[in-house]
Image (tube, rainbow, N blue to C red):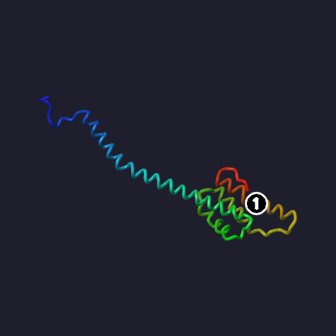
Amino acid sequence: MASEAFWTIKLADCINFGILIATIAAIIYGPIRAVEITRQKDIERDAEARKRLILSALMRTRKMTMHPDHVGALNQVQLEFFASPPVIAAFRGYVANLSEAVPAPGNDLNNFLTRRSDLFCIRPVRAALSNEAHC
């Protein structure tokens, strides 16, 4: 043992130094990464909640197309569902149907209202929630 120099590095010392560096990195980087993940999850949860609020307002006022909540929810669709082309396509079809003239009472009116209900209920809600919609 007397022949060993003071500054001699052994394999065990290198392993311990590596473990020390890894521990320090984990202590510093771990909480930062945890906060980043939590913030991302919160953003995703908030976006989903906003989408559900819009769909809830639309479904609640579906028979009152001029209701302020209905109009406000329609105005929010393009902002919240911009990344969902099926929803945007269904939204455009529904808005186009809203601007059509309502036919006189009779068979044409029933077909018109059925088409409006299909445009409103079935396609956008299925596309938005990716499951069956019951209107």
Mark 1 packing: few (<14 Cα in 10 Å), some, or many (20+)?
some
Q: Which residue is mark 1?
A: 117
Q: In x, y percent, where is residue 80?
A: 59, 61
Q: In x, y percent, where is residue 74?
A: 66, 65
Q: Residue furthest left?
A: 2
Q: In x, y percent, where is residue 3?
A: 12, 29
Identify the residue at image location x=75%, y=58%.
118
Q: In the displayed structure, does residue 38 sit left or right of residue 121?
A: left
Q: Residue 83's quadrant in the figure?
A: bottom right
Q: Residue furthest right?
A: 106
> Label 1 is placed on what type of residue?
Ser
Identify the residue at image location x=68%, y=56%.
125
Q: Secondary structure at mark 1?
A: helix
How many numbered dots are placed on residues in this image? 1
Q: Residue 75's quadrant in the figure?
A: bottom right
Q: Is residue 113 above or below residue 17?
A: below
Q: Quadrant of the C terminus?
A: bottom right
Identify the residue at image location x=70%, y=50%.
132
Q: In x, y percent, where is residue 111?
A: 82, 61
Q: Residue 7's quadrant in the figure?
A: top left
Q: Quadrant of the N terminus?
A: top left
Identify the residue at image location x=67%, y=71%.
68
Q: Is residue 61 above or below residue 122?
A: below
